Amino acid sequence: MIRKIHHVAYRCRDAKETVEWYGKYLKMNFILAIAEDEVPSTKEPDPYMHIFLDAGGGNVLAFFELPTRAPMDRDRNTPTWTQHLALEVGSMEEMMETKARLEADGIQVVGPTDHTLFKSIYFFDPSGHRLELACNTATPKMNKMLDEVKWDMLNEWAKTKKAPKHAAWMHDGSYQD
């Protein structure tokens, strides 16, 4: 039924700053701006600027600036590492070039982190959203091994709420190709 994600929307603190930041560091083109004084779905009077960025491959990342609302904050009941947007890059070289651009401007970057299936870096945008750039490193064999145990892992987790060890090879160094 679902053909693709049409867009994913987040709040930002400043629409212009967000467009410029995502263009500079992630090379996302600004593709659309919509501004209204009333929310179309609820008819609530609430002025906003809604911006849309090209995230590649037909994917769109959108943001709302809401000037009449209380300042942005994050979900204090969720650890900062949990909620993030992971974006795929084509090579480690692209990822490391982006890391260098971010760090040159004083933006703190964690990583690269080796997740076995991919390597990634983490950083925050100007509005405080955690972003991840990921470069795939999985082999077809790795993907097959994970596919074969996904339901066993999920079912065990549902019963125990403890991390199943069906794919411990991802983190313990025991993977053999």
Image: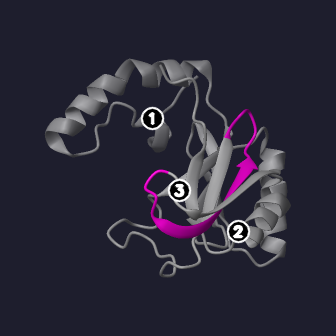
Q: Name the residue under label 2.
A: 15
Mark 3 crowdedness (10 Å alpha carbons): few <14, some 14-19, many ≥20 = some
User: Does the magenta portion include 150?
Assistant: no
Residue 109: assigned label = none
Locate residue 77 relative to residue 133 in the image: left or right.
left
State how far apart marks 1 and 2 are (Cα).
43 Å
65 or 78, which lies in front? 65
SS for tag 1?
A: helix
User: What is the crowding at mark 1: few (fewer than 14 residues within 10 Å), some, or many (at least 20)?
Assistant: few
Give coordinates of residue 92: x percent, y percent. 78, 45
Give the mark nearer the N terminus: 1 vs 3: 3
Q: Do the residues labelled 1 and 3 touch (CB within 8 Å)?
A: no
Highlighted range, magenta: 41-59
| Residue that mark 1 sits on | 169
Q: Quadrant of residue 12?
A: bottom right
Q: Name above or below for residue 147 compared with residue 135.
A: above
Whole-percent x, y for residue 77 in the image: 32, 69
Q: Are marks 1 and 2 in contact (CB under 8 Å)?
A: no
Q: Where is residue 35 in the image (x, y as percent from the top left)?
A: 67, 61
